[in-house]
Amino acid sequence: MLKNARYLLSTLTEFPHLKDPRGKPLPEIALAGRSNVGKSSLLNHLLGQKKLAKTSATPGKTQLLNFFSIDDRFLLVDLPGYGFAKAPKDTVRNWSQSIDAYLNSRPTLKLILLLLDCRRELSEEDLSLLNWAEAKQIPLLAILTKTDKLSRSQIDTQLQRLSQMLHCEVIPYTIKNPASRLLLEKRIEKFI
């Protein structure tokens, strides 16, 4: 169970390099997805803290890479959302460059949690990240967010469709069900 989450820093350029007491670099898990997919809500729910990550109905609220230490065992990195965001184009371009720099320079990156709104089709950015992770051989777990907005049969249809389309595991997630958190915790434990 993920118990102790601690905010470390927010940055676009200076990424931390933390080590365990034996001097081994801490593994990292990146949280990615389009703007307004529910990354901050999932992060708060998963870590059992209501205000660890700022939530907003306005897309593009996460504008930096936010690093969190989890139980002093691994880092969780909340990446800025891609796609529609209410921000200047230069700012969005800086986010994109920082995300690319982060993803391409972290040998400690062990898993990408790609959040997908269960009511939306995959975007070009979603597919690009999926292809990149596959090419780099970095495990990726697709998480269907906002599943409380669909019926059980609609969720099952989406899970089946995406499982056939993607080359990774797809799991449903809703902040309204504690079982979602337990399932995701178990998957994360396999990679840290």
Image (cartoon, rainbow, N blue to C red):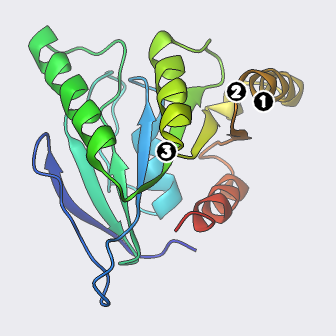
* Up-down relation of residue 162 to residue 108 (above or below): above
Residue drawn at 24 percent across, 24 percent down: 96
Q: Position of residue 18 (x, y in %)?
A: 24, 71
Tell me if mark 1 has few (under 14), some (14-19) or many (20+) residues whose alpha carbon lies within 10 angstroms of its own: some
| Quarter where residue 134 is shown | top right
Question: Which structural element holds mark 3?
Answer: strand
Whichever of callouts 3 and 1 sits on the residue coming sooner in the sequence is 3
Task: Point out which mark residue 163 bears.
Answer: 1
Q: Nearer the viewer, residue 190 or 83?
A: 190
Q: CA distance from mark 3 to mark 1?
A: 16 Å
Please name the amino acid that badge 1 sits on.
Answer: Ser
Residue extending furthest toward the right? 153
Question: What residue would you read off at disc 2?
Answer: 166
Q: Secondary structure at mark 2?
A: loop
- Numbered label attached to residue 112: 3
Mark 2 and 1 residues: CB-CB less than 8 Å, in contact?
A: yes
**Residues at marks 3 and 2, CA–CA distance in whole angstroms:** 14 Å
